C-alpha cells in the first residue's frame, strides 16, 4: 500500500449493508489503514452478489467475478511453475481446502496510449519488468518507473485500450514457456508457435530476464565450438561458452557464417537457437527451408520477431531466446545462440525509450543502452561441473555503416564480447567469401578453444596472411619484384583462395587439419588459383577413400603427431604426382 494518505473508502454493492456488516467493514479498514478513514456506500445494481471495496488504489473484489479471478490466479500459481499432464489432479488438490481471502488487488488507470506504449497512473507498487493485465485482456510490461506514473510496453493489439481503461498488477515478471517440444519449431518471442504445426507442450516457464551466472558458477572456456569454416576455426577459434561478435556492413555474409555454424553442429549434441530481430518474413522462411534441407532444424529453434512486429516484441526477442537456451544449459547441454542482429534490437529499444520520454544521449540512444546488451550477453557461460557443465555460446551479429567499427553500438558490443569476426565489404566484392578481415578479427580465447591437432596444424597461417596483405599493398607502387617476393605473393594468394568456402559446405576437423597441413607446406604453390577449389575437393576425397584411418584418428582424438603430419604430406604429394 502506498504511503499516500487515504481520506475515504468506497463500498459498491446492490443492497445497502446492514449496521453489523458496515461495522465489520469499518473495523477492517481501521485496522489496516487507520481510524480516520470514512466509508461511503454507492449503489451498484451490476453487482449481483457480494460487494467491492475500494480503499485508495487498492480494491477488495468480493463479487462472484472477483472470487473467480482469485481462484484462477491460485490455479495459475500452482500450474504455471511446472506444466504437467496431471493438471486436473493438481487442481483438485489445491481446491480441496481453498477459501477466498480478502487480498487487495492494486488497480491503475491508463492516462495515455499510443505506438505500443501505455502510461498508467495509480500503480504505486509496480516493479520494473512486471506484467500488467489490462481490462481488455491485453498484456503489457513495465519498462519505465516515474514518481506519479509508469510506462508500459504492450504485447498485444492496442486498439481496444483507451484512456481510462483499468489496469491491474499480476505480481509476475515477463516469462516464456520452455521445453524440448520447441526443438524444430519457429516461435515468436512470447513462445507462441508461428509455423502452423500446432501447439507446443511446455515443460517449464522461465523469466525472460534472469541474472548471469557468477564467477564461481563458471569454468574456463576450453572446448571448441567448431564452425566448420576453415578461416575461423584455424585463426579465430570459438569455444563453448564464449561470446564472439560477427560484425560487418550489410550484405557481407554475417548471417551465412552463423547458419554454417548451425549446420556444422549436426551430430555434435549441440542445440541451436536462432533469434531473428527485424528480419523479413521471406528470409526466415527461406532460412527454415535451407536448414531443413541440411538436416539442421531437428536441433534448432527459431525465435522470430520480424520487421512487421511491434518494437516491444522485437525488444524482448533476444531475452526470450536466451531463456530457452538457459533451460537446456541447466540440463547440462551445450547451446549455440545467434542474435541476428543486435543493431536492430538497439534501434527498437531506442524507439521505445523515446516514446517513454527518456532523455536521449549519443545517437539518440538512452543512457542504459550498454546495459541493454551486457545483461543479455553475460548470460552466455560455461557452467561449472557442479551445475551440470552445460554452456551457452553466443554469436551476436552487428551491422556497421561503411565499415565504421567505432560507432556507438559496435564499440559497446565489442567491449562486452570475447572477440569479433570482422567481415569486410571490399574482400566480399573481390570474391573472398567468407570475407574475414584477418587484421581486425580476434578471438580472446584463442588456442584454449582449439584441439591440439588444429592448433598444431594452423601454425603460421595468420602471420603468413598478414605478411601477404602488407606486401600486396606495397606491390601496388612497384612493378619490379624479386623472385622471393613473387613467391611470397603467389603463396599468399593461394592461401586466400584456400580459405574461400561455399555456404552450407562446412569442413570436418580432419578435412581442416589436412588442408592446413598441406597448404602451409606450400602444396598449392604451383596450382593455378582457378583450379585450387577443385584440387581441394579431389585431395580430400582421396584421403577419405584411401587413408580413412588418419581421418578417423584426427576426428576421434583431436590429436596429430609429427609422424601423422609427415604421412599426410607424403600421401598428398603422391596423389599430386599421379595427377
Image: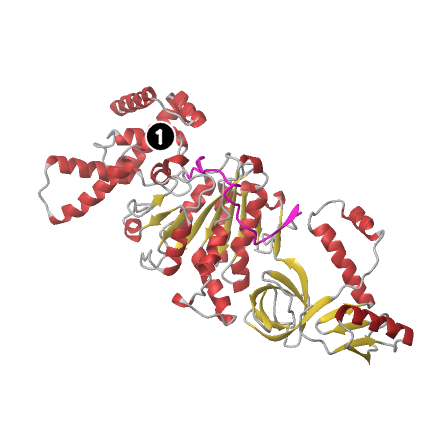
Residue 290 highlighted magenta (yes or no): no
The image shows a total of numbered marks equal to 1
| Image quarter (top left, top right, bottom left or bottom right) of the N terminus | bottom right
With 146 as the anchor, is 241 left or right in this view? left
User: Residue 330 in the image: x percent, y percent?
Assistant: 58, 41
User: Residue 447 in the image: x percent, y percent?
Assistant: 37, 35
Nearest to the observer: residue 157 or residue 5: 5
| Image quarter (top left, top right, bottom left or bottom right) of the C terminus | top left
With 549 as the anchor, is 333 left or right in this view? right
- The answer to whether residue 135 is visible is no
Assign a secondary structure to mark 1.
helix
User: Residue 34 in the image: x percent, y percent?
Assistant: 76, 72
- The answer to whether residue 474 is visible is yes
Figure quadrant of residue 25: bottom right
Nearest to the observer: residue 141 or residue 194: 141
With 61 as the anchor, is 165 left or right in this view? left
Q: Main secondary structure of the magenta part?
A: loop
Against 560, is 443 above or below?
below
User: Residue 37 in the image: x percent, y percent?
Assistant: 77, 77
Residue 214 highlighted magenta (yes or no): yes
Q: Which residue is mark 1?
A: 513
With 409 as the anchor, is 88 left or right in this view? right
Nearest to the observer: residue 326 or residue 524: 326
Residue stretch rendered in magenta on the structure? 201-227
- Residue at image x 79%, y 66%? 66
Q: Which colour scheme appears in the figure? A: secondary structure
- Residue at image x 69%, y 70%? 107
Amino acid at each position: 500500500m502506498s504511503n499516500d494518505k487515504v481520506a475515504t473508502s468506497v463500498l459498491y454493492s446492490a443492497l445497502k449493508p446492514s449496521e453489523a456488516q458496515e461495522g465489520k467493514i469499518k473495523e477492517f479498514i481501521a485496522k489496516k489503514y487507520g481510524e480516520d478513514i470514512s466509508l461511503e456506500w454507492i449503489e451498484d445494481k451490476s453487482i449481483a452478489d457480494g460487494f467491492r471495496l475500494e480503499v485508495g488504489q487498492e480494491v477488495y473484489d468480493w463479487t462472484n467475478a472477483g472470487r473467480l479471478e482469485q481462484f484462477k490466479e491460485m490455479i495459475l500459481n500452482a500450474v504455471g511453475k511446472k506444466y504437467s499432464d496431471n493438471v486436473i489432479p493438481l487442481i483438485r488438490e489445491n481446491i480441496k481446502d481453498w477459501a477466498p481471502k480478502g487480498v487487495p488487488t492494486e488497480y491503475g488507470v491508463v492516462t495515455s496510449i499510443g505506438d505500443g506504449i501505455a502510461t498508467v497512473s495509480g500503480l504505486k507498487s509496480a516493479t520494473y519488468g512486471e506484467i500488467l493485465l489490462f481490462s481488455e485482456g491485453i498484456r503489457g510490461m513495465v519498462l519505465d518507473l516515474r514518481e506519479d506514473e509508469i510506462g508500459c510496453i504492450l504485447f498485444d493489439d492496442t486498439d481496444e485500450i483507451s484512456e481510462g481503461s483499468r489496469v491491474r498488477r499480476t505480481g509476475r515478471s515477463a516469462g516464456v514457456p520452455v521445453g524440448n517440444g520447441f526443438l524444430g519449431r519457429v516461435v515468436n518471442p512470447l513462445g507462441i508457435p508461428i509455423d502452423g504445426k500446432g501447439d507446443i507442450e511446455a515443460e517449464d516457464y522461465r523469466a525472460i530476464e534472469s541474472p548471469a551466472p557468477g564467477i564461481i558458477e563458471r569454468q574456463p572456456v576450453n572446448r571448441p565450438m567448431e564452425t566448420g569454416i576453415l578461416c575461423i576455426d584455424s585463426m579465430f577459434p570459438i569455444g563453448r561458452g564464449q561470446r564472439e561478435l560477427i560484425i560487418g556492413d550489410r550484405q557481407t555474409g554475417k548471417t551465412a557464417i552463423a547458419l554454417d555454424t548451425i549446420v556444422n553442429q549436426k551430430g555434435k549434441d549441440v542445440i541451436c537457437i536462432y533469434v531473428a530481430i527485424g528480419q523479413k518474413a521471406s528470409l526466415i522462411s527461406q532460412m527454415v527451408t535451407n536448414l531443413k534441407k541440411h538436416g539442421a532444424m531437428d536441433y534448432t529453434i527459431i525465435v522470430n520477431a520480424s520487421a512487421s512486429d511491434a518494437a516491444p516484441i522485437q525488444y524482448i526477442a533476444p531475452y526470450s531466446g536466451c531463456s530457452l537456451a538457459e533451460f537446456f544449459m541447466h540440463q547440462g547441454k551445450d547451446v549455440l545462440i545467434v542474435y541476428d542482429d543486435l543493431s536492430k534490437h538497439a534501434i527498437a529499444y531506442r524507439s521505445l525509450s523515446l516514446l517513454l520520454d527518456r532523455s536521449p544521449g549519443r545517437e539518440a540512444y538512452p543512457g542504459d543502452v550498454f546495459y541493454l546488451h551486457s545483461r543479455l550477453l553475460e548470460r552466455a557461460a560455461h557452467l561449472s561441473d557442479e551445475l551440470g557443465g552445460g554452456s551457452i555460446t553466443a554469436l551476436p551479429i552487428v551491422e556497421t555503416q561503411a565499415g565504421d567499427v567505432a560507432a556507438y553500438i559496435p564499440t559497446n558490443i565489442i567491449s562486452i564480447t570475447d572477440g569479433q569476426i570482422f567481415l569486410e565489404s571490399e574482400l566480399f566484392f573481390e570474391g573472398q567469401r567468407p570475407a574475414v578481415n584477418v587484421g581486425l578479427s580476434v578471438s580472446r580465447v584463442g588456442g584454449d578453444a582449439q584441439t591440439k591437432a588444429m592448433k598444431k596444424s594452423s601454425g603460421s597461417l595468420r602471420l603468413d596472411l598478414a605478411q601477404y596483405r602488407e606486401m600486396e599493398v606495397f606491390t601496388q607502387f612497384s612493378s619490379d619484384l624479386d623472385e622471393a617476393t613473387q613467391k611470397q605473393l603467389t603463396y599468399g594468394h593461394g592461401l586466400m583462395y584456400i580459405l574461400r568456402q561455399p555456404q552450407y559446405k562446412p569442413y570436418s576437423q580432419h578435412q581442416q587439419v589436412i588442408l592446413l597441413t598441406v597448404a602451409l607446406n606450400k602444396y598449392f604453390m604451383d596450382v593455378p588459383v582457378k583450379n585450387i577449389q577443385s584440387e581441394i575437393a579431389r585431395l580430400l576425397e582421396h584421403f577419405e577413400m584411401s587413408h580413412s584411418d588418419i581421418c578417423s584418428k584426427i576426428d576421434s582424438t583431436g590429436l596429430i603427431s609429427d609422424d601423422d603430419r609427415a604421412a599426410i604430406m607424403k600421401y598428398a604429394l603422391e596423389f599430386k604426382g599421379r595427377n
